[in-house]
Amino acid sequence: MKLQQVLSYVRKAVDDYKMIEAGDKIAVGISGGKDSLTLLYALHALRRFYPEQFEIHAVTVDLGFRNLNLDKMKELCRELGVEYTIVETDIAKIIFEDRREENPCSLCAKMRKGALNQAIKAVGCNKVAYAHHKDDVVETMLMSLIYEGRFHTFAPVTYLDRTELTVIRPLMYMKEAEVIGFVNKNQVPVIKSPCPADGHTRREYVKNLLRRLNLENPGVKERMFTAIQNSDMKGWTL
C-alpha cells in the first residue's frame, strides 16, 4: 500500500470527525509498532497540504524493558524533521517485578497513558493522536460485549477533562491488513514489543475470534463497523 492510499483514509477520518483545527499541536505516541509508525508517516505527510496548519511532536513512553533500542525511532524522527521526546519510566519493573501482576495490561495502560499525557502537556500539545485502526474499533466493541455486557467502543474524538487534552484516532478507517501492507512495502523500521505479555492478552483472543468469524462469514467485521457507525454511541454521529 502506498502512502497516498493511507492519506486518503486519514484525510477522510480527519474531515468526517473534525479531528484537526488550525493551530493544533498534536502529539503522536509512537511505540515502535506498525500502527503508531504508520500514523506518524501519515500525519507528517498530511501537514504538507492540509488546509488547517498544525504541528506534530512524537513521544515514546519507555516502559523500562532493558532490551528496547530506540535508535531507529530517533533516526526516523530526524529524517522526517519531527520533534521527538522519550519519557523514561520504571513501569515494567513495577508491574512485572514489584507487583508481579497476573493481568498486567490494564495497569500498564493506565500508567503508560499517565506518563504520556504528562509529557504531552509539558511540550505544549493540545491533542494526542492514537494509532487505533478499524480492527481495533471492532475488537474493542466485541471485548466490551463479551467481558462487560455492553455495546461500546472508543470514539473517533475524545476530550479528556482531567488533562484538557483531546484524543484523535486518524487511522480508524484503515484495516490492520492495510497497515501491514504499508509497513512491508515501505520498509518501515518497526520495533518488536519487548513486553512478555505481548500476544497473550484478551485482545489477542478476541482478534483471533474475529478472524475466524470473518473467515466463516465474509464481511462480518465491516458490518460490525457499520453497526458502530450507525449506533447512538457518543462521538460516532457524523
Image: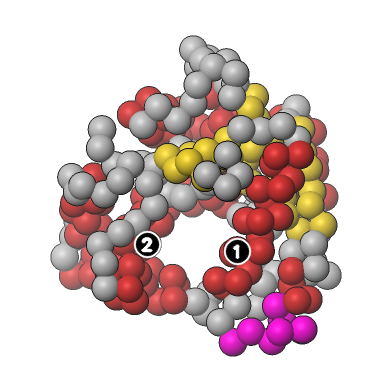
Left or right: residue 140 versus residue 65 is left
Q: Disc 1 versus disc 2: distance between alpha carbons?
A: 16 Å
Percent x, y of residue 40:
60, 38
Placement of 172 over or under 41, stated as above or below: below
Residue at 25% from the left image edge and 37% from the top image edge: 237
Percent x, y of residue 87:
79, 52
Label 1, secondary structure: give it: helix
Q: Quadrant of residue 123?
A: top right
Residue at 58% from the left image edge and 39% from the top image edge: 164
Quadrant that contains the C terminus? top left
The magenta stretch spans residue 101: yes
Left or right: residue 1 versus residue 99 is left
Placement of 174 over or under 208, stated as above or below: above
Label 2, secondary structure: give it: helix
Earlier residue among tags 1 and 2: 1
Amino acid identity at mark 2: Thr
Residue 47 shows in the view: yes
Q: According to the image, label 2 marks what residue?
A: 140
Amino acid identity at mark 1: Lys
Percent x, y of residue 190:
65, 53
Other-residue count near label 2 (Cα within 10 Å), few / some / many at <14 / 14–19 / ≥20: some
Placement of 50 over or under 100, stated as above or below: above
Other-residue count near label 1 (Cα within 10 Å), few / some / many at <14 / 14–19 / ≥20: few
Residue range corresponding to the magenta coloring: 95-102
Residue at 74% from the left image edge and 45% from the top image edge: 119
Closer-to-camera residue (106/62):
106
Left or right: residue 179 versus residue 120 is left
Quadrant that contains the N terminus? top left
Q: According to the image, label 1 marks what residue?
A: 110
